[in-house]
Image (tube, rainbow, N blue to C red):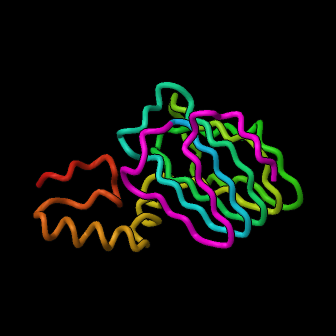
């Protein structure tokens, strides 16, 4: 893996032999630098705090790793600048058709990128410890959970 990144102001995610999940309202960034080796990373980019006016850029350095991106329905993914070494691919079961764009760059060595939208993204978020914690918090506060759907307001 290389150490230099072209994204100076990027949100950095590093995973080495572990699982990293960032769900719900966890960032306002539009640039991400993801480095993973023999790891699983799940990033939720459905938050209303993330601006899709300009393309959101995800620079990758994956080695035997899987990255799952939870996206809004209208986001179109552009993986032209992504280099695969060995086996790997971008799995996008329901491509977006809207004007918002996700730009994937970098290199993937024997890895996989999964793009999930709609109900599939919601189910992915719901199958996590963060969702259970959010349910408990929402129940005690008398509000609604937001990990499953970050566009939902917490009020009742």
Residue 2 in magenta stretch: yes
**Quadrant hosting residue 130:** bottom left
Residue found at x 52% / y 26%: 54
Q: Residue 110: image x %, image y %?
A: 82, 62
Foreground of the two, 115 or 56: 56
Numbered label tally:
0
Q: Is residue 2 left or right of residue 136?
A: right
Residue found at x 56% / y 53%: 69
From the viewer's perspective, is residue 124 above or below residue 132?
above
From the viewer's perspective, is residue 127 above or below residue 107?
below
Residue found at x 85% / y 61%: 87
**Which residue is situated farthest in the right direction here?**
86
**Quadrant hosting residue 20:** bottom right
Foreground of the two, 90 or 107: 107
Query: What secondary structure characterizes most of the magenta part?
Result: loop
Residue found at x 47% / y 47%: 45
From the viewer's perspective, is residue 22 above or below residue 74?
below
Q: Residue 83: image x %, image y %?
A: 82, 45
Q: Is residue 74 left or right of residue 61?
A: left
**Which residue is situated farthest in the top direction here?**
53
Assign the C terminus to one quadrant of the image.
bottom left
Q: Is residue 76 left or right of residue 152?
A: right
Q: Residue 102: image x %, image y %?
A: 59, 37
Q: Residue 113: image x %, image y %?
A: 67, 56
Residue 136 in magenta stretch: no
Residues rendered magenta in the picture: 1-29
**Quadrant hosting residue 8:** top right
Foreground of the two, 91 or 9: 9
């Amino acid at each position: 893996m290389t150490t230099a990144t072209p994204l100076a102001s990027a949100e950095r995610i590093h995973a080495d032999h572990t699982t990293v999940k960032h769900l719900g309202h966890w960032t306002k960034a539009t640039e991400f630098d993801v480095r993973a080796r023999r790891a699983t990373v799940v990033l939720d980019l459905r938050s209303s705090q993330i601006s899709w006016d300009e393309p959101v850029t995800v620079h990758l350095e994956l080695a035997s790793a899987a990255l799952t991106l939870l996206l809004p329905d209208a986001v179109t993914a552009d993986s032209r600048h992504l280099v695969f070494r060995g086996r790997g691919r971008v799995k996008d079961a329901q491509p977006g058709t809207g004007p918002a764009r996700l730009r994937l760059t970098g290199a993937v060595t024997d890895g996989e990128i999964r793009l999930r939208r709609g109900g599939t993204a919601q189910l992915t978020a719901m199958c996590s410890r963060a969702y259970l914690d959010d349910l408990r918090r929402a129940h005690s506060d008398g509000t609604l959970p937001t990990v499953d759907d970050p566009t939902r307001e917490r009020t009742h």
